[in-house]
Image (spheres, coloured by chain):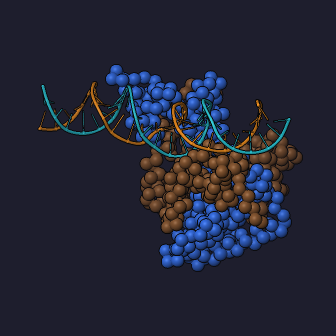
Chain colours: A brown, B blue, C cyan, D orange
Amino acid sequence: MARDHTHQVKEVARIAGVSVRTLHHYDEIGLLVPSSRTRAGHRSYTTDDLLRLQQILIRRELGMPLREIKRSLDDPAFDWRIALQRQRTQLAERAERTASMLRAVDAALAALPTEGETMKEMTPAQITDLFDGFDPSRHDAETHQRWGDADAYRESARRTSGYTRADWDRYKAEAHDIMSAAAQLLQAGAPTDGDEARAVAERHRLLIDRWFFPCSPVLHTGLADLYEGDVRFGQNLDTYGQGLATWLAAAIRANAGG
Amino acid sequence: MARDHTHQVKEVARIAGVSVRTLHHYDEIGLLVPSSRTRAGHRSYTTDDLLRLQQILIRRELGMPLREIKRSLDDPAFDWRIALQRQRTQLAERAERTASMLRAVDAALAALPTEGETMKEMTPAQITDLFDGFDPSRHDAETHQRWGDADAYRESARRTSGYTRADWDRYKAEAHDIMSAAAQLLQAGAPTDGDEARAVAERHRLLIDRWFFPCSPVLHTGLADLYEGDVRFGQNLDTYGQGLATWLAAAIRANAGG
DNA sequence: GCTTGCCCCTCACGCGACGTGAGGCCGTAG
DNA sequence: CTACGGCCTCACGTCGCGTGAGGGGCAAGC
């Protein structure tokens, strides 16, 4: 229990996954001053020092500048609520940016010349689509105004809701195609880890991704569980063929795992 | 149609959401040299330049150093489609990471002592608890594979598959509770943006989050669309009551938006 | 014609969070 | 006694810009 053994720099660096120079730096700026030194002047880190380092690294990962980290750790009257809320808004902005960039990537993919065709000129609207989400002032409108105000919400709602009847019809058609393909494969006895099954799973993933939310392969497996587990949904999916939900879920996992 | 209009720096900066200085910098280091200059020496960006800029910004956001970006973009073997598709998945992963960090911060905020009354100084132990849900090892699995490797991976693997029969029964019971509650509210004519509806939506979000995948409120709205849009699912959900899918979707959006 | 703005230009220094040597001390092992 | 690995302290380099300073171009209004 009494692990009051002290560590020297290289050990600490290895344990924490940072460089020795970083520890020197943190010492220089007073962010992490080792509790003691050996007579030879070598830095000697205690377990408490390691805990402090852990806190430092967590905050650094959150994007907090070192100066702020120092204050937050040294000042007992530090206002955590404000700090955390600021981190929250920063993270929320980052999330928005990432999501918007995904849309931008999609826009760029859509603008790609199809099969050897030459690139067409783009309309201004297409160009702005390319950079949708890159402009900080846009989500300033969203975040600063509490997310819920009319304009900003509608802008974001373009993805999160408000599909038209025609949109739904298109979605249903696309979904139907994929489900039919899956049902055919299932009936033909195709293995869930085969190339065809993976292709179907990937099509399904991209469908979700385009229509609803960023759907990485990993998240897709979670969705597969949801499909498979939710009997209500499974029963209906199975109208396409006995056990289709299970089959598709397995294919999705194979697609993500390989 | 022939939109071969060129843009000057400030326009490009505004569109792309970067500073003019940044564009100057990219010009200096040869990363993005505008195709032409006016006789006055002003930079003049074409649509192709904008496309290149988009690539630059995406890669930058993904943490690629500018020097590498330049090399990869100048490489004659560069394939737009492959690059864009790879970026799609990387962005999706990043979105997941950001979402999980957001939830960790939210959890920390929720764990804060309520209202300045008893808001004395926090003990180091309390602070540690605050960040309990925020173990960097999880994210590092993706970034540099530092701290934890096996454990973190297993944690995530456990989530993505392999539920037992008993697990499913428990899930179904929990889901049934929530759906019943929602059906009751719907029948009682409760508004979708009321406190009760939001509570149900939040319970649903946490259900998904615990059982299937990290489910932020924003992603939850996407799932709501999926619920609402997927007639097959909607029909079944509606066995709980007429129009339940639509009602729940609206409640979810209200819960995310407010 | 001249000023007023607004946009543009080129230096050029500053900054945060380290990286990267240079040059030297400490202690143990051969 | 020397080699070696780990530690130390300067101190300058790097990356991706921010932030002025000092000045030109050009259309609009006085």
Decide which of B69, A20 is in the foreground and name it: A20
* Viewer-nearest residue: B202 or C14: C14
Q: Quadrant of residue A51?
A: bottom right
The quarter in which the N terminus of chain A is drawn is: bottom right
x and y percent of residue B68 in the render?
60, 31
Closest to the observer: B41 or A56?
A56
A230 shown above or below A26? below
Q: Residue furthest top?
A: B39
Above or below residue D25? Residue B61 is below
Residue plotted at (62% across, 24% down): B75
The tally of labels here is: 0
Is residue B210 among what the camera can see?
A: yes
At x 74% / y 52%, what residue is drawn?
Answer: B148
Q: As drawn, which residue projects farthest toward the right?
A: A189
Residue A224 visible in rendering: no
Question: As displayed, is residue C5 above or below residue B141?
Answer: above
Q: x and y percent of residue B118 in the render?
A: 52, 77
Q: Is residue B167 left or right of residue B137?
A: right
Q: Residue at x 76, y 68 (%)?
A: B171
Q: Residue at x 64, y 34 (%)?
A: B83
Q: Is residue B227 above or below residue A169?
A: below
Report x, y in % for residue B247.
59, 67
Q: Quadrant of the C terminus of chain A?
A: top right
Q: Position of residue A186 (x, y in %)?
A: 84, 48
Q: Is residue D23 left or right of residue B72?
A: left
Dividing the picture into quadrants, the one containing residue A246 is: bottom right
